Amino acid sequence: MATASPARHHAVVIGGSIAGLLAARVLADHFARVTIVERDQFPTAPVFRAGVPQGRHLHVLLERGQQLLEQYLPGFTKELLAHGGQSFDFIEGVRLNAGYGWNPQFFGNIPFISATRPLVEWLVRQQVLAQPTITTLPEQRVVALMATPDQKRVTGVQVQRRDDQPDNPISELAADLVVDASGRHSAAPDWLRTLGYQAPAVTEIDPHLGYATRVYHPDPATPRTWLTLYQMMQPPKHLRGGVITTVEGGDWLVTLSGYGDNNMPPTDEEGFLAFARSLPTPDIADAIASATPGSPIYGYRDTSNQWRHYEKLSALPDGFIVTGDAAVAFDPIYGQGMSIAAIDADALARALAGAHDPALRGFGPRFQRDLARAVTPAWQLSSSSDVLVPGVTGGKPSFTVRVQNAYLGRIYRIIPKQKRARLTFTRVVMMTKPPTALFHPAIFLRAMRG
Ligand SMILES: Cc1cc2nc3c(=O)[nH]c(=O)nc-3n(C[C@H](O)[C@H](O)[C@H](O)COP(=O)(O)OP(=O)(O)OC[C@H]3O[C@@H](n4cnc5c(N)ncnc54)[C@H](O)[C@@H]3O)c2cc1C
């Protein structure tokens, strides 16, 4: 643990979700005090909260994300298991159809823990807030940045009590560094404009993905060979898909998904079941027909890929950085967001370790460039597949992307038949191997032979 220098007295994090909590954890190694400002009241149990509306839907924690959580929060994995997270091998326990038949299940040595989003966030929060120098300011909304008179340095935030009274008084919270982790609807571009800076350019690629999710109680007497059943979408061929995953308590979280208005999974009983029946295989519909509903059906559509290019800005005030979904948010179908929040925190830890100026002058642009580099492989994976979706807005497949997609199409065809391809593909998706691993000669030759 590094020692905080006098110029690194207090850091403020905007947003107490996964990215904000992990940023706070890292900042605590370099600042005497860290305050997380969060507009919600933090629940005292692992339950849904309004500030994270996506929390009712399937949240996969990729292997790379789990590794980083364990690194920064030692004992996290044990806690997740102790609280009912379901542990299984991702090849053996997942029955997967990626558009070309059900894949064989075998032991692949790819550990995976399935749990609901509220449980993951609650455990991260318990561990982060156990650090005595990290405190929270709940039910407070950040409404603006404070700055020096020449606007060259952010000096804190203005906060307003969040009980929906617009004339609530505004108070000020001074900070040596402000970290925006307020999610995909971050107001930071407007705050920067108010200080006289340019807002970042935005790349938004929207394949118009919708989710509908419901909890089911499975019949324990029915034998099954899987803990997750996954009928993948395969644009442009299959624009509907579904996942059943076993979470704490042995319940199933059933998420149906579709691209475009004609494929939005409905949230009424009849429509939900009919949508499940419309999938290319009957397995998901048959499984849920054998189970008992355990919740209402919740829909979600706010899912586009959004990259706010802070790394390309010619100027940023000192004392301010952006992380998590507020910087780069992903189409959730690839299950990357929480792991990216951990990758961003890791980039922050490295950048702070290498920053010798106690006042962190010029730190923001450097960190945003590091973050951009760290998230690029994940962005390429999600955005290059999404440009294949008919009706996608904001992205067109370049020549390179078309070649990549053609190759990936061949990989999907061979993964039911070649163990090495299936293992490597899974590790690329889990972010523990780079996408270039799919060009291993044995995989390449098989893919080209078809
Ligand atoms: C439908 C859906 C499914 C997903 N599935 C997966 C998955 O399978 N796997 C995965 O890893 N990721 C998934 N994600 C992504 C994941 O939810 C996020 O990437 C992850 O939560 C990290 O986001 P974040 O912390 O940056 O922002 P968020 O989780 O959006 O949190 C932002 C926080 O900031 C607070 N806040 C906002 N504005 C203010 C303000 N002005 N003042 C104070 N507080 C503020 C909010 O209340 C909230 O707590 C999914 C996302 C969606 C939409």
Image (cartoon, rainbow, N blue to C red):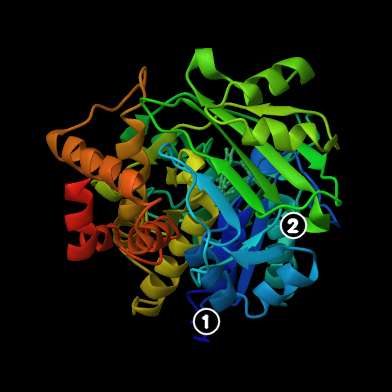
Q: Which mark is residue 12?
A: none
The spot of residue 415 in percent (x, y) is 37, 52
Residue that appears at 73% across and 52% down: 118
Q: Quadrant of ligand 1?
A: top right
Residue that appears at 71% across and 62% down: 86
Count of numbered circles in the view: 2
In the image, the residue with mark 1 has its CB under 8 Å from the nearest atom of ligand 1: no
Residue that appears at 56% across and 43% down: 230
Mark 1 crowd level (few <14, some 14–19, many ≥20, 10 Å Cα): some
Q: What is the quadrant of residue 80 in the picture?
A: bottom right
What residue is disc 1 on? 4
Sooner in the amino-acid sequence: mark 2 or mark 1: 1
What amino acid is at disc 2? Leu
Vertical order, 191 against 172 (above or below): above
Vertical order, 109 against 253 (above or below): below
Q: Nearer the viewer, residue 337 or 292?
A: 292
Q: Which mark is residue 119?
A: 2
User: In this rendering, would 23 be left or right of 253?
Assistant: left
The spot of residue 290 in percent (x, y) is 80, 36
Mark 1 and mark 2 in contact (Cβ < 8 Å)? no
